[in-house]
Amino acid sequence: MLSGKKIIVFYITERSGHHSAALALKRGFEVSDPSVSVKCVNAFRYLFPIAERVTHRVYLFVIKRIPAVWRFLYDRPSFVKRSAGLKGWIHRLSFNKLSRLLNEVAPQAVLCTQAFPCGVLSAYKRERGGSFKIYGILTDFAPHSFWVYDEVDAYVVASDKTREWLVQKGVSPEKVHVFGIPVDPKFSKQTDKTEVRVKYGLDKDIPAALIMGGGHGLGPIRKIIKRLDECEVPLQMMVVCGLNRKLYRWLASQTFKKRILVFKYTDEIDQLMSAAHLVITKPGGITTAEALAKGLPMIILNPIPGQEARNTEFLVDAEAALSAQTVDDVVPAVRCVVTRMLAAGGSLTGSTGRSLARPASSRDIAVFVLNSL
C-alpha cells in the first residue's frame, strides 16, 4: 500500500476508552501501512487546557455522586437543541488553534474517537473549509445525537444495530460502515491460555475472573471481591485498579481466602483477558469490545447512566453479557458462568454476541480509511 498519508486521531481524556481507541487506530495504521504518519491528539487538552481539567473533574463528580443528572441530560433532544448556540460558540473559540495544528500536520484524514472533536472539526470545515476528510469512530454500541454532523465523511460503528440507530438520527446510510469498535491488533493474536495463566502464577485448573472498573477503577469492587472471596464457587481473581490508588492500597493490605492478583493501570489487558474465563466490569465500549474479541463472557455491574447503560442493554440483548443489578447478583451470575464452563466448556456468549467480536477492527478501519482517501 505504502501511501505516505498523514492522519490525525483526536480523542479526549488521557487513560480513557477514547484514548485507548486512538492508540489502537494508530497501531492499526502502522500494521496496515508503515509509511502512514499518525498523530494522536487530546483535542480537549490541546484546544482548551484549563477547561479540560475542570470539565473532567466535574464529569467524574457527577457520575459518582449525582448520576441521575447525567442520566437526565444524556442524549436528550431538548438539551441537544438548547445547547446548539453554546456549542457553536465553543467551536469557534477553537478555530485558530485548530488551524495551526492542521497547517502543521496537513492531514488527509482526521479520525475522532469522541463526539466533541468531531463537532469541532465539522464546524471548522463548514466555516473555514479544508481538504481533509472527517471520520467519526464510535466507541460505544449505541450512538448519541452529538455525533451527527453533515460534514463527517464517514462513520465507523460497532454493529448493524448501531448503524440502524445512527441512520435513524439522520445520517445517510451510505456514510455508515460496520467495522467494530477499534481494539489494539494484539487482541487478535492467538494465545496459549495455560501458558499465560502459568506466567501470572494462576492455577491452570481453577476458573479465573478478571474484575475491572474502567480506567478510574470505579464501582463497588471491594464489595464484589468480598462476596466472591466468601462464596463456594471455585475461583481465582485478577483485579485491575486503574487509577484508583485507594482501592489498590486496600487490596494490598487485605488477606483473602482465594488467590487474588492485583494490578494498577496496565497495558497488559490482552494478556489478562487471555488468562481469564470471564470478566466482571463496567460496560465501557472499549473494554467490552476487547472482551468480545477474546471471546469472554461478561458480567456487567454499575453502568454509568447514558452510554454505559445503553451498552449494557445492547450486550445483554445480544447474549454477550449478563447484567447484575446489584452486588448481591454477582455471585449467582458467576456461579452460572463457572458451572456451565466446568460442565461442558460452555460460554454465555450466544451466536449474536459472537458475531460482534471484531479483533481485527483497528486494521480493518485503517485499510478502509486509506482506501477511501
Image (tube, grey):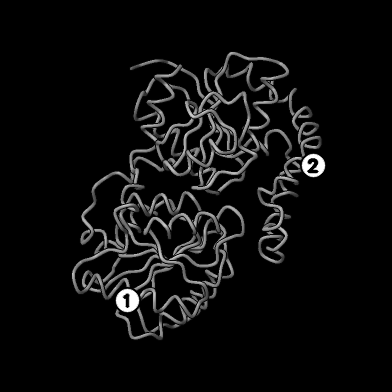
Give residue 249's position: percent from left, percent from top.
54, 72
For label 1, the crowd category at 10 Å Cα-Cα, with few meaning under 14, some 14 to 19 and many 20 or more, is many
In the rendered view of the protein, which quadrant contains the N terminus?
Answer: top left
Residue at 52% of width from left, 17% of height from top?
108
Tell me: residue 261, above or below residue 72. below
Tell me: residue 144, above or below residue 233. above
**Which residue is disc 1 drawn over?**
235
For label 2, the crowd category at 10 Å Cα-Cα, with few meaning under 14, some 14 to 19 and many 20 or more, is few
Q: Is residue 254 left or right of residue 185?
A: right
Where residue 121 sits, quadrant-wise, is top right
**What's the amino acid at mark 1?**
Leu
Of helix, strand and loop, which one carries label 1? loop
3D distance between C-alphas at marks 1 and 2: 50 Å
Residue at 81% of width from left, 37% of height from top?
86
Give residue 85's position: percent from left, percent from top.
81, 35
Q: Is residue 36 left or right of residue 120?
A: left
Where residue 371 sits, quadrant-wise, is top left
Q: How many marks?
A: 2
Where residue 349 sits, quadrant-wise, is bottom left
Mark 1, mark 2: which one is toward the viewer? Answer: 2
Give residue 364's position: percent from left, percent from top.
36, 32
Q: Are marks 1 and 2 in contact (CB under 8 Å)?
A: no
Q: Nearer the viewer, residue 136 or 21?
A: 136
**Which residue is disc 2 drawn over?**
82
Among the two numbered marks 1 and 2 on one chain, the one whose residue lies closer to the N terminus? 2
Please identify the residue farthest to the left as the structure is shown: 344
Of helix, strand and loop, which one carries label 2? helix
Tell me: residue 105, above or below residue 343. above
Give residue 234's position: percent from left, percent from top.
29, 80
**What's the amino acid at mark 2?**
Arg
Q: Nearer the viewer, residue 57 or 281?
A: 281
